Amino acid sequence: MANPLAEPLNPLIHEPAPLRNKIINSLRRAIETGVLEPGTRLVEKDLCEKLNVSRTSLREALRQLQAEGILTDLNNRGLTVVTVTRADAENIYRIRGVLEPLIVEQFVENAQDDELKALKAHSDVLKKAYLSGNAEEIVATKREFYDRICTGARNPIAFDLLKKLTLLTSPLRRSSVVRKERRSQSIAEIEAIVTAIVNRDKAAARTAAEKHVANSAVSAFSTAYDAS
C-alpha cells in the first residue's frame, strides 16, 4: 500500500466531511514532511491544481492556517510557510516541556483501559518507526502516538496547541529523529512513558515526559543550528 504521506499534495477526494479541513490536513502534512519548507511561498494556482480544489476552498484553509501562525504574509507578497527563529524554537520546546507532561498526567487520570492498551500497542509501532530511520514515518507515527494521549487525556485544547507547536518545529524534528543516537534514546524514553502510564503512575509518567522533551530539544538544537 502506498504511503499516504509520500505525496501529501495529491488531488483530494471530495467527501461529505468539510473540504476545508481536508485541505488544512493536507497542507499540514506537507509542512510536517518537508514538502513545503519554511519560507516557501504558496502559489494558489499551483495548490488548486495539485489538490483539485477551488480557489475559494483553498483560501478558506489558508486563512485558518495564517490565523494559527503557521503561514505568514511577508510584505504583502503572498503567504509563505513561517520560518521559526532559534529563540522561538527554544520557547516552543519550553512550552512543550510543560504541556506534554501535563497531558500524560491527564491520560493516566482519565483514559479508559482500552485506550491504555491501544496506546501500549501503538508504542510498539512507534518503536518500529524509530528503528526504520525514516523521518517521515517517525514523525507521522509519533503524531498519532500523541494524538492518542491527548484524546485519552480529554484535553482538546492541549491537543490543538501541541499540533501547532510540533508543526512549527517540523524541520528541527526531522533533522533530529534521523540521528541514530537520538532514535535509541527516544525508544527508551517512550518505553519509560508507556510503562509509567500502564502502571497508572502519574509522577513517573510526568518525569518521563519531561525528560523526553528536554532530550528532544538538546538533540534538535545540536543538529539544526551548529552551522549558523
Image (spheres, rainbow, N blue to C red):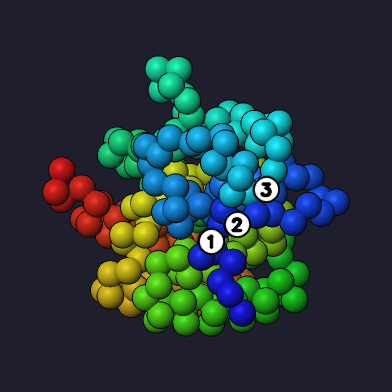
Give percent across and percent down for residue 150: 63, 56
49 shown above or below 2: above
Q: CA distance from mark 3 to mark 2?
A: 8 Å
Q: Residue at x 15, y 43 (%)?
A: 228
Give percent across and percent down for residue 101: 50, 56
The quarter holding residue 177 reads bottom left
> Which amino acid is tagged 3?
Asn
199 shown above or below 42: below
Give percent across and percent down for residue 83: 36, 37
Given the current orientation, which residue lies at the most extreme right position? Answer: 16
Q: Is residue 220 left or right of residue 105?
A: left
Name the image quarter holding the N terminus: bottom right
Give percent across and percent down for residue 115: 71, 71
Q: Residues within 10 Å of mark 1 (few under 14, many from 20)?
A: some
> Which amino acid is tagged 2?
Asn
168 shown above or below 146: above
Q: Is residue 157 left or right of residue 185?
A: right
Marked residue nearer the N-terminal end (1 or 3): 1
Q: Secondary structure at mark 1?
A: loop
Numbered label tally? 3
Any part of residue 36 in sight: yes
Q: Residues within 10 Å of mark 2 (few under 14, many from 20)?
A: some
Tags 2 and 1 touching, CB below 8 Å: yes
Q: CA distance from mark 2 to mark 1?
A: 6 Å
> Which amino acid is tagged 1?
Glu
Marked residue nearer the N-terminal end (3 or 2): 2
Residue that mark 3 sits on: 52
Q: Residue at x 47, y 25 (%)?
A: 78
Residue that mark 2 sits on: 10
* Residue 7: mark: 1
Nearer mark to the viewer, of 1 and 3: 3
